[in-house]
Amino acid sequence: MITDVKPKVDDLVQTPIPTRHGEFILHYYSNTLDDKEHVALVRGKVDGVEHVPVRIHSECFTGDVLGSRRCDCGEQLDMAMQMIAERGAGILIYLRQEGRGIGLLKKLQAYNLQDTGMDTVDANIHLGHLADEREYDIAALILESLQVKSIELITNNPKKNRRPAKARRRCCRSDSDCCRGPQ
């Protein structure tokens, strides 16, 4: 018997996390879509607020943790936290979807293919994956659980701001400096 499980997240734990950008509240989420541990770092009042700065960051072990120079993920993460701290409020959603959703093993294999001259997309396809397998439904559910009215997306990819409203599920002001992301 196949049953339709309604996608949902549960905010199981909230705890203060002091960072070099000040204190954030870390929200730990379980969900009905995957078995991954997604989190949100929240600064200031966001519930019921419009135009909340939001970074949706996909896990990058090599960039975020090791500071690898193969990407700028760690720098993007740090810059987003700094921007949120400077604004006094905002959300950083950290999605556990390593390597554009292909996982750490395949990402490391893709690195080896990149060393032979392939770009990221070609390497992922060569390994039997799509160019980008990341999903953002959980991020939308997290924003709903935090009762955010609308967001300003912090991104280094302006094309993300032109996605259909259904995919975003929240308003993003494309005229905002926050939406354009770091220059």
Image (cartoon, rainbow, N blue to C red):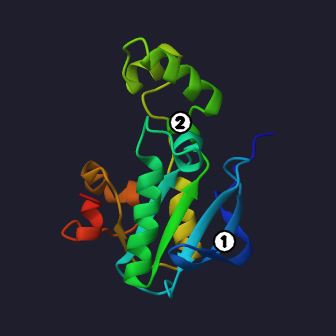
> For the residue labelled by badge 2, is the local secondary structure a helix, a strand or a loop?
helix
Asked if 118 appears above or below 168 in the picture, the reply is above
Q: Residue at x 38, y 16 (%)?
A: 118
Residue located beneath label 2 in the image = 99
- Does the image show residue 169? no
Residue 72 placement: quadrant: top left
Could you tell me the amino acid type at mark 2? Gly
Q: Badge 1, how many Cα within 10 Å: few under 14, some, many 20+?
A: many
Q: Nearer the viewer, residue 48 or 111?
A: 111
* x, y percent for residue 124: 47, 22
The answer to whether the residues at label 2 and label 1 have Cβ atoms under 8 Å apart is no
Badge 2 or badge 1: first in the primary sequence? 1
Picture disc at residue 116 = none
Q: Badge 2, how many Cα within 10 Å: few under 14, some, many 20+?
A: many
* x, y percent for residue 9: 67, 64
Residue located beneath label 1 in the image = 27
Quadrant where the C terminus lies? bottom left
* x, y percent for residue 133: 50, 35
* x, y percent for residue 48: 47, 87
Quadrant where the N terminus lies? top right
